[in-house]
């Protein structure tokens, strides 16, 4: 009996919990040598307590530590059986270079001239998809501080969806925000896409080459041309007491890194991780000490205050900082291009080929 068959025979209550941690049973498979059972969590990130729970469940299923490996995108998951991977970087890079829908990367000379001279209608760009609590909190603050009108801001969810309603009500209640605002009642707020039944599709037929598909990696050049900086609402934000070690960089950050100055609503340490990988950030525009703040509320307030302060400086001030920062954007594009090419689907295969 091989290890995959052994897994299928463990008690059902353990197996259900393990599959839930991995999101899908298809993410569990044998290594090429069949000496290891691979748990592929490369598209997401696992907290330390989740890893400990996975390890405990496998132990109950009579798996030893030398029989399994976890592939995960949490760079701070320093555990015996975990291998970190930057699969989201390769996912983004593959799409920017090989996808049908993004045809402006890297910037050419004409685009660089246009980006430096074009009159913007907004100051910042911020894409919000799934209504995670930190995004609801952030959008609420933007609305309360009259900053929404200064940005291109999206919120893709629908107000009658149970997940949106429950997250919003819980978030508002926990933060003493009462009923919230009309902004959430009128969701979704769409930029380049429209609601099509239960899904979204491009708003204009010529917006993207593939007109029937909306993808989280797609974004039009017009949004970059019409704003000066991006506020990135990352997937992971809240640190857990005594367990702040989680770095998960998604396509949301990488899209901003190679197109504009940015500030990240995310876990502490994410800017440091980008620096370690050769990317430049924008301390001339933002006080980036937020990257070292582990307290969730303090970090949140620091970030929203930075956005407000910059917007209140006015158009000319923000434009001048943007022009001053533009070489950093071009540097980041070059770093992005210089990193080795690896197909997203091959990342895990290359990690486990010798296991």
Image (cartoon, grey):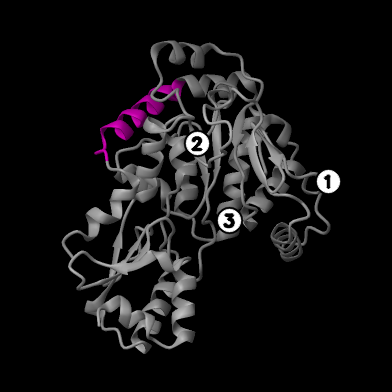
Which residue is denoted by mark 3 in the rendering? 298
In the rendering, at what x and y percent does residue 210 appear? 53, 31
Looking at marks 2 and 1 on the same chain, the residue that comes earlier in the sequence is marked by 1
Q: Any magenta on residue 334?
A: yes
| Dot 3 or dot 2, earlier in sequence | 2
| Residue position marked by numbered label 2 in the rendering | 262
Residue bounds of the magenta highlight: 324-341
Quick check: 177 above or below 303? below
Q: Is residue 351 above or below residue 100?
A: below
**Which residue shows up at 73% across the image and 49% down it?**
158
Q: Residue at image x 69%, y 46%?
A: 139
CA–CA distance in space, label 1 to label 3:
26 Å
Q: Secondary structure at mark 3?
A: helix
* Element under disc 2: strand
Q: CA distance from mark 2 to mark 1?
A: 28 Å
341 to the left or right of 228: left
């Amino acid at each position: 009996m091989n290890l995959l068959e052994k897994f299928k025979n463990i008690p059902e209550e353990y197996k259900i919990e393990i599959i839930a941690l991995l999101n899908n049973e298809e993410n569990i498979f044998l290594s090429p040598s069949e000496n290891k059972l691979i748990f592929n969590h490369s598209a997401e990130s696992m907290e330390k307590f989740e890893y400990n729970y996975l390890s405990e469940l496998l132990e109950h299923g009579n798996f030893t530590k030398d029989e399994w490996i976890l592939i995960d995108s949490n760079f701070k998951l320093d555990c015996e059986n975990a291998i970190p991977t930057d699969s989201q970087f390769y996912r983004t890079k593959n799409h920017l270079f090989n996808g049908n829908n993004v045809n402006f990367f890297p910037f050419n000379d004409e685009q660089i001239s246009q980006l430096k001279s074009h009159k913007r209608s907004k100051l910042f760009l911020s894409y919000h998809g799934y209504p995670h609590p930190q995004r609801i909190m952030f959008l609420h603050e933007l609305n309360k501080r009259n900053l929404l009108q200064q940005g291109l801001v999206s919120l893709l969810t629908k107000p009658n969806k149970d997940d949106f309603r429950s997250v919003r009500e819980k978030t508002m209640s926990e933060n003493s925000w009462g009923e919230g605002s009309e902004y959430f009642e009128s969701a979704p707020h769409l930029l380049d896409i429209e609601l099509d039944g239960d899904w979204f599709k491009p708003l204009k037929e010529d917006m993207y080459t593939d007109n029937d598909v909306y993808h989280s990696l797609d974004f039009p050049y017009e949004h970059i041309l019409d704003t000066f900086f991006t506020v990135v609402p990352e997937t992971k934000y809240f640190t857990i007491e005594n367990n702040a070690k989680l770095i998960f960089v998604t396509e949301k950050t990488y899209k901003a890194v190679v197109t504009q100055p940015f500030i990240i609503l995310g876990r502490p340490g994410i800017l440091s991780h980008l620096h370690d990988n050769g990317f430049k950030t924008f301390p001339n525009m933002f006080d980036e000490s937020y990257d070292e703040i582990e307290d969730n509320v303090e970090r949140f307030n620091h970030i929203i205050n930075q956005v407000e302060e910059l917007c209140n400086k006015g158009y000319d001030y923000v434009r001048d900082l943007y022009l001053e920062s533009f070489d950093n954007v071009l540097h980041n594009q070059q770093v992005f291009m210089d990193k080795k090419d690896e197909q997203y689907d091959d990342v895990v295969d290359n990690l486990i080929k010798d296991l």
